Image (cartoon, grey):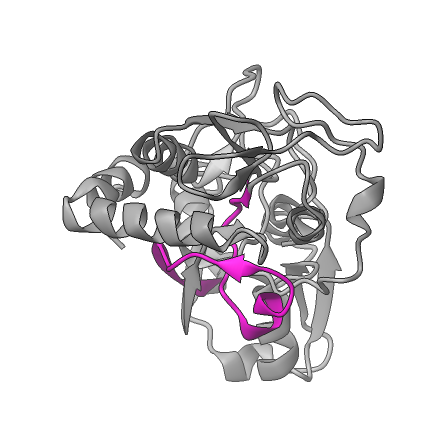
Amino acid sequence: MADITRKNHPLDALVSRRNFVALCGAGAAGLGLAACGAQPSGDGSADSAKSESGYTLVEGGKLIGVSDMAYPPLESIPDGGSEPEGFEIDMMDALAKKLGLQMKWLPATKFDTIIPLIKQGGKADVGVSAFTITDERRQEIDFTDSYLDSNQGLVAPKAAGELSEEKLNVAGTQIAVQSGTTGEAWVKENLPEATCVPLDDAIQAMTGVQTGLYAACVADLPVMSYLCKESYTDLQVAIEIPTGEQYGIVVSKDNQQLTKDLDKAIAEMQSDGTMDELQQKWFGTTL
């Protein structure tokens, strides 16, 4: 993910989730966000409360989440709406219920500030924004077990016909990505002769490809497939890139019991078919 803010278009707030952001680049202390319903303490951080299970919550009885709300159909805020929706939103509602908690969300937050925010503590209990589980990120925070698998997808105009990495890996070819994502990393590593163009969000990349500004763009396959089907119908996923990524929920290293309880709840939802039902609802298939 990269810096993303919600825009007015229903899909305008898209962000590439398989990001490996420079985790220390953003100072969470300056975010100035307040947890929904939490009472701030004198130093600006929210009061915390111990749950019966032994983990610390920002606010008793609530699981406070933070997301950039900009990656349909995983999480987004519809145009003209105020409530978030998507696969991850429904998933977190169900997980919170299993923990006997009420799910609450902070206002939409830039993707690359979420991990520092969770690491700092005091404002949110979990970060949920299609975070790819990586060793680099684990140096900063904990991840739950994976709840969704993903690969990357390279999107190009349908009129471009059949494409290959070899055709794209030439000087002068511009490939758009969202800054700080695993898509950006893949382009730099696998298409070194092409020009990698980092942008604020994936919607800019898709629009740039649609208007002919860029030859292609790279982002998470489930989201790219969704957008090509629902909005950018003149574009297509030209290349599926098998990166074998997995999404996890971000939790503070100081809150290990919460991670364990979420792992248990995720396993229950996977075994009882709830995860498959949510995937079918939001992706039209199971991934």
Q: Tell me where residue 94 appears, x and y as whole percent.
A: 32, 33
For the question of whether residue 282 can be seen, the reply is yes
Q: Does residue 54 appear left or right of residue 6 in this picture?
A: left
Quadrant into which the N terminus falls: bottom right
Up-down relation of residue 268 to residue 42 (above or below): below
What count of labels does the image hold? 0
Q: In which quarter of the image is residue 88?
A: top left
Q: Residue at x 38, y 59 (%)?
A: 145
Q: In which quarter of the image is residue 45?
A: top right
Q: Nearer the viewer, residue 231 or 285?
A: 285
Report the residue that reaches farthest toward the left.
272
Quadrant into which the C terminus falls: bottom left
For the question of whether residue 285 can be seen, the reply is no
Q: Which of 177 and 255 is in front in this view?
A: 255
- The span shown in magenta is 126-153
Q: Which of 128 and 189 is in front in this view?
A: 128
Q: Which residue is drawn at 60% across and 27% down?
A: 9
83 inside magenta stretch: no
Q: Residue at x 57, y 15 (%)?
A: 80
Q: Does residue 145 appear left or right of residue 234 in this picture?
A: left
Up-down relation of residue 38 to residue 89 (above or below): above
Q: Does residue 245 appear left or right of residue 42 in this picture?
A: left
